[in-house]
Amino acid sequence: MTAAASFCDLTLDELAASLAAPAGEDAPEPGRAVRSPSAAHVFGALHRVARWSTDDRGHRAPILGRAAAAAVAARLDLRLPQIVEAEPSSDGATKLLLALADGARVEAVHMPRAVRNPRVTLCISSQVGCAMGCTFCRTAQMGLVRNLDAAEIVGQVFAVVLALGPVDPQRISIVFMGMGEPLHNLDAVLRAVRILCEPAGMGLSPQRITVSTSGLVAGIEALARAEVRPALALSVNATTDEARARIMPVTRRNSLAALRSALLAFPLRSHEKITLEYVLLAGENDGDDDAARLAAFAAGMRHNINVIPWNPFTDGGFARPDDARTMAFVARLRDAGCLVTVRKSRGRDVAGACGQLATDTVRVRRSAPAGPR
């Protein structure tokens, strides 16, 4: 007998194989299973929020016919990460604390945007904690507890959307900018992206999903080869290897020159740009020379430099630049021909902004082998 698989961990082909096998037995290889119309129907019912309902006891479940419901109940685990705390921000964002099956906790942020066609951006986590050690980031203070698996990543998205919306998946954008280094857990992240982008399910566009990395060259190269590839953002944050290594230890193995080469080789879709994130730290990386070097780093690639004034946290050790210094830095970049945006960080008043996420989960054992470094 095999344990019930999480519905969040199965691709459409794998679900078809599971439904083709007697309950409790190993499914045939997905490639050898015949994909039946019922498999696509069941996958859609499982992965589309609009097809879930609430019973009299407050339990949520997908709307399925009797036979399909019985098949799902016998084969699949429908449990999701549990939202144990939701903190609404004055700016409309909501920071959520989610408990996983083993008791570990991660944070996610739900950010509605009031634009002509209203959308919601979900900032989600790929790890419990992080191993990268960036000194300006609160998550780094946790260290790496463990990777999330694909089911936990998809489940995180689904739990948040089920609680706060939107019902229409075409209004969802996802950024892997929560807890963890996504390219340090690349296999699970790409599997989750593939499941989230399955047309029979949520059907998200991979162009609406962005993976942000501290700068793992091998991971960037692997991401470039992905069959279902999300967009890429690089957190730059300093313009010399010496300065960057002080605040981002990952630089000791991944120099700025190597990162730039990987970005120049990264295959971009039509109209796609690489996002270069730059957390602005007063007196540390906000000088005119820094702006000139950052513009030189961006030269030759389709880019958007996203300047992020640092979001403070207790014992953070840095200072947030004032608006005048921020706009002077931005002006230097624009004068050099760069496309620049300034991030309006959401959820700052509930510690839900960029660099502020962390939980009380602690590392109690050696983590499983991780991805490229």
Image (cartoon, helix red, strand yellow):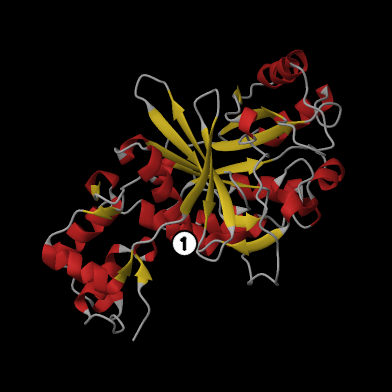
Residue 109 image offset from top left, x and y in percent: 52, 39
Secondary structure category for the residue under label 1: helix
Q: Nearer the viewer, residue 85 or 261?
A: 85
- The amino acid on which the numbered mark 1 sits, given as a three-letter code, is Ala
> What residue sits 34% from the left and 36% below the top?
166
At horizontal 55% and vertical 23% (from top left) the residue drawn is 90
Residue lying farthest to the top in this orientation? 324
Looking at the image, which is closer to me, 3 or 320? 3
Tell which of 317 and 341 is nearer to you: 317
Is residue 35 at least partly visible in the picture? no
> Horizontal and vertical percent for residue 265?
58, 49
Q: Is residue 351 above or below residue 65?
A: above
Residue 289 higher or lower than 245, as above or below = above
Residue 332 in which image quadrant: top right
Q: What residue does disc 1 label?
A: 150
Residue 91 in sight: yes
Quarter of the image with the C terminus is bottom right
- Determine whether, in the image, residue 321 is placed left or right of residue 25: right
Q: Residue furthest bottom?
A: 1
Q: Quadrant of the N terminus?
A: bottom left
Question: Residue at 27% across / 55% down in the picture?
Answer: 61
Q: Position of residue 21 (x, y in %)?
A: 22, 80
| Residue neighbourhood size for the residue with mark 1, other residues' Cα within 10 Å, grouped as few (<14), some (14–19), many (≥20) | many
Image side of residue 363 versus residue 204, left or right: right
Q: Residue 293 at x, y = what percent? A: 77, 31
